[in-house]
Amino acid sequence: MSVSKKSVEEIVEALGGKENIVTASHCVTRLRLALLDEEKVQKEELDNNDLVKGSFSANGQFQVVIGPGLVEKAYAHLLELTSLETASKQELKDATEKKLNPLQRAIKTLADIFIPILPAIVTAGLLMGINNVLTGKGIFFPDQSLIQVYGQWKDLADIINLIANTSFVFLPALIGWSAAKRFGGSELLGMVLGLMLIHPDLLNAWGYGDAVAKGTVPYWNLFGLSVEKIGYQGQVLPVLVSAFCLAKIEQFMNKRVPDAFKLLLVAPVTLLVTGFLSFIVIGPLTFSVGTVITDAFVSIFDNFAAVGGFIYGGFYALLVVTGMHHTFLAVDLQLIASVGGTFLWPILVLSNIAQGSASLATMFLIRDEKGKGLSLTSAISAFLGITEPAMFGVNLRMRYPFIAAMIGSALGAIFITINKVKAASIGVGGLPGFLSIFPQNWLPFFVGMAIALVIPFVLTIIFGKMRSKKAEGQETKSVA
């Protein structure tokens, strides 16, 4: 599908004209806009545009769903038509953040930190999936893995595993870079901070439990103060809070140190102070908080698996609508680091598939060709992990497909949580998502996928036919 300048011009007019657009940016699928007055948006005209797959307001931004590959072309036309300059995420943040309440700001902050590093994490997840196929027992041979039968594949699997693990091994460095940038500090110092927290001289966080049991935890003696000499591999909270402190200390120093001495003082003092705070105060406290959060989620899904699966599976789509789903990425990463796998991310996969299935079903209910085409392309996009076109362009617009998808996702989630399905990593949140699931969990996960495919499709068809009959009945009464 081509992106005509005329279509984008119609979008601008439906948004209240170019004078109503303060600034604009875009992500993989959506135009993200800061508007002077959202009341001026002509929603019906916007949704009737051939290029638009949906629109909504969230976190102080008005977002127009265009689709992957097309949004960049639409954005280029938008800049030309409105005479706006390319907006950075910081500029868009400044333009919209004033409208947000504290909770919305916190959610948006997490999104701003994790979205930039998501490609590295998803890529690592896919590569780890390939490694799982090569090393998983019982996939190709009973009680044996492929590399056990064909030893010449072992080194290939080792290299793939090394490449895949890099993003997770150095996760604090990625988070440190992104968080420091988000909080207004130096990205380079943020990266150094993250690497410092996983320095090889520190006790590896994954061996902390055994060291405590054996009484072999190493300590620093700082003038009588004992500080645990441990790293924070795979941890999220320690580097997030430390990066915030680093950015604020750096900003404080930059305002007060003369330009001639900044190179000599700002970075060394900032890193030194933040380092001491991280190891003495921030690290131990946030490590404990992270452990409590992890234990809480594990306890819920261990003792009330069906309830946990039903709630998270049923309402995950609503989290996406509000933008709150980004907060759970940190929980996923924490679970992977702490217990070796996450039971939340497989539910995300089922939710995405369910939205795609419901969108696909609408293709058989809609009469006009444009609607059929939108339903099909949106479904394919959702099956590959990008759900915005299906959710905002089809399912939410018609309502009952969205409800059918939530029901199917909840039922599938109940099944996989009862069967203790876990993912070794985060990957593509669609049909290829099985690659990130532990091979021994594939069978129950495939059953969950089938539930998430079949139930929403069937319910959407049933709800759609019921709605049509009701509409026909009302029409007959009005004629009579």
Image (cartoon, grey):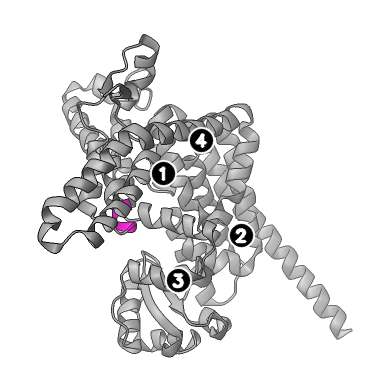
Residue 158: percent from the left, percent from the top?
Answer: 20, 29
Q: In the displayed structure, would residue 452 be above or below residue 152?
A: below
Q: From the viewer's perspective, is the residue at label 2 or at label 3 nearer?
A: 3
Q: Nearer the viewer, residue 48 or 197?
A: 197
Q: Which residue is mark 3?
A: 96
Q: Earlier in the sequence, mark 2 or mark 4?
A: 4
The CA distance from mark 4 to mark 3 is: 30 Å
User: Mark on residue 402?
Assistant: 2
Q: Which residue is mark 4?
A: 293
The CA distance from mark 4 to mark 1 is: 25 Å
Determine whether, in the image, residue 380 is placed left or right of residue 81: right
Q: Nearer the viewer, residue 55 or 400?
A: 55
Q: Amino acid at mark 3?
A: Thr
The CA distance from mark 2 to mark 4 is: 30 Å
Q: Amino acid at mark 1?
A: Gly
Q: Earlier in the sequence, mark 4 or mark 1?
A: 4
Element class at badge 3? helix
Residue drawn at the location 73% of the way across and 67% of the way down: 467
Residue 57: percent from the left, percent from the top?
Answer: 53, 70
Q: Main secondary structure of the magenta part?
A: helix
Q: Earlier in the sequence, mark 3 or mark 1?
A: 3
User: Mark on residue 433?
Assistant: 1
Judge the density around disc 2: few (<14), some (14-19), many (≥20) Cα neighbours within 10 Å.
many
Q: Earlier in the sequence, mark 4 or mark 3?
A: 3
